[in-house]
Image (cartoon, grey):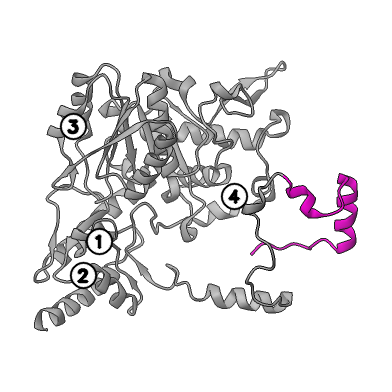
Amino acid sequence: MMQYIGNTHEEQQAMLKELGVDSFEELLDTIPEQLRIRGLLDLPEAVSEIEMRALAATLAKKNRSTQEAISFLGGGAYDHYIPQIVDFLIFRSEFYTAYTPYQPEVSQGTLQAMYEYQSMICELTGMEVANASMYDGGSALAESALMASRVTRKDTILLSETVNPYYRQIVETYCAGQHIAVKILPAKNGITDIEILESSVNDDVAGVLVQSPNYYGCIEPLTEYGKVIRDQSKKALFVTATNPTSLGILEPPSESDADIVIAEGQGLGNHQSLGGPYLGVFALKEKYVRKMPGRLVGATVDEDGDRGFVLVMKTREQDIRRERATSNICTNQGLMALAATVYMSALGKQGIRDVANLCTQKAHYLAERLAEIEDVSLKYDQPFFNEFVVTLPLPAKEVIQTLLEANIFAGIELGKHSPEKANDLLIAVTEKRTKSEMDAFASALKSMVSEALVL
């Protein structure tokens, strides 16, 4: 809840006088009359600050957080453990209140944090360059589609059906405004249909966008896709979306000859926070760097030979001619990127590998437990990281609602995206889940399924 002290009527009149107008309405002259609301809004009566705080607290209590319930939710936001050092450092005033670094000489701490973040993302993904971050995973993927079109000067994007459906919507929205056609590559057994990919890629395609681990948790054969794309087209860029935590044990996308790698960085030390703000990871091959959206921070030395940091590239509308701008994104998620930097520094290479291993082992343990339940089965016969889909003998929505009463967030119902998948449940497991929690989930689901089968 934002705290503020309002302006008095006298202060408002003084500001209007300074602006040379008699009323606030005069400032709205450019807004067409038919778009204005006349009269009072249908709002409740005003209350005091004390009453407002009490009301806000009451409304907040209606939310049930992962501190109160056992979470098996995923789909792009995960309940990972965040070391205390992360919040301790990012909430220091020099970071928490810092503004965007337009003046390098007074922004060295912020710039160095961005530089270290970029370096760590390059190590994690195996790519040559990473920008200073973007808004979130969805917008990063959409920006990759626009970038592929700029690089190739083509206007067709192939987008896998197994990509997060919300990301797909964002890509389609971005591309619509740029008159870029988006064609969906259908899935087969939980992964992109490679035969259709092979028949769809040609020199008129700007880019192929694939996610691995994908929205269903399946690990896609990226190396095979990379070979198909290179064989079928001399121009199309290969874009992969990934879960950065999975790179603790999975081969980095660079090994599949990816041109651009994007990710949602929430799992790298950022809280779920009811949906945001999150962190868009964007990395690429160096040869495309001048077509990249966002900012790039570099290290240098000053005239005295001391190390310093500067913004070496910021191809945005405020800094260069509008027609040459690579994006209308005007900044980066500095605080979220700092959290990821502190998190990766605290865990180190071995720590990230350990987290990834725990997620994998625990997810497979739970998958095996659930598959033992009568009429419950794993939907896809594919390798997976920390997420998987089970098919139930009853609607997933009913399971979610019932287990919520037992303080268990059971997962995501896939029926909300595809009605034919109403009985499919997407389940995520992180390193935080204990054996007793997973056993409790399995037991609760088994009881519910047994009752449903009797009825």
What separation in Å lies between label 2 and label 1 (alpha carbons)? 8 Å
Residue 393 appears in which quarter of the rendering? Answer: bottom left
Closer-to-camera residue (360/33) = 33
Question: Which of label 3 and label 4 is nearer to you?
Answer: 3
Residue 248 in magenta? no
What separation in Å lies between label 2 and label 4 (alpha carbons)? 42 Å
Question: Which of label 1 and label 4 is nearer to you?
Answer: 1
Residue 422 placement, left or right of 35: left
Disc 3 residue type (three-letter): Leu
| Residue under numbered circle 1 | 415
Q: Is any atom of residue 405 visible in this view?
A: yes
Question: Outermost residue toward the front?
Answer: 34
Sequence-earlier tag: 2 or 4: 4
Disc 2 residue type (three-letter): Pro
What separation in Å lies between label 1 and label 3 (alpha carbons)? 26 Å
Residue 214 placement, left or right of 323: left
| Residue under numbered circle 4 | 90
Sequence-earlier tag: 3 or 4: 4
Spot occupied by residue 166 in the image (x, y as percentages of width and height):
36, 49
Q: Could you tell me if the residues under marks 2 and 1 are in contact, i.e. CB atoms within 8 Å?
A: yes
- Numbered range of the magenta stretch: 1-29
Residue 27 in magenta? yes
| Residue under numbered circle 3 | 197
Label 2 sits on a secondary structure element that is loop
Label 4 sits on a secondary structure element that is helix
Spot occupied by residue 150 in the image (x, y as percentages of width and height):
42, 22
Label 1 sits on a secondary structure element that is helix
| Residue under numbered circle 2 | 395
Sequence-earlier tag: 1 or 3: 3
Label 3 sits on a secondary structure element that is helix
Residue 437 versus residue 124 in the image, above or below: below
Disc 1 residue type (three-letter): Gly
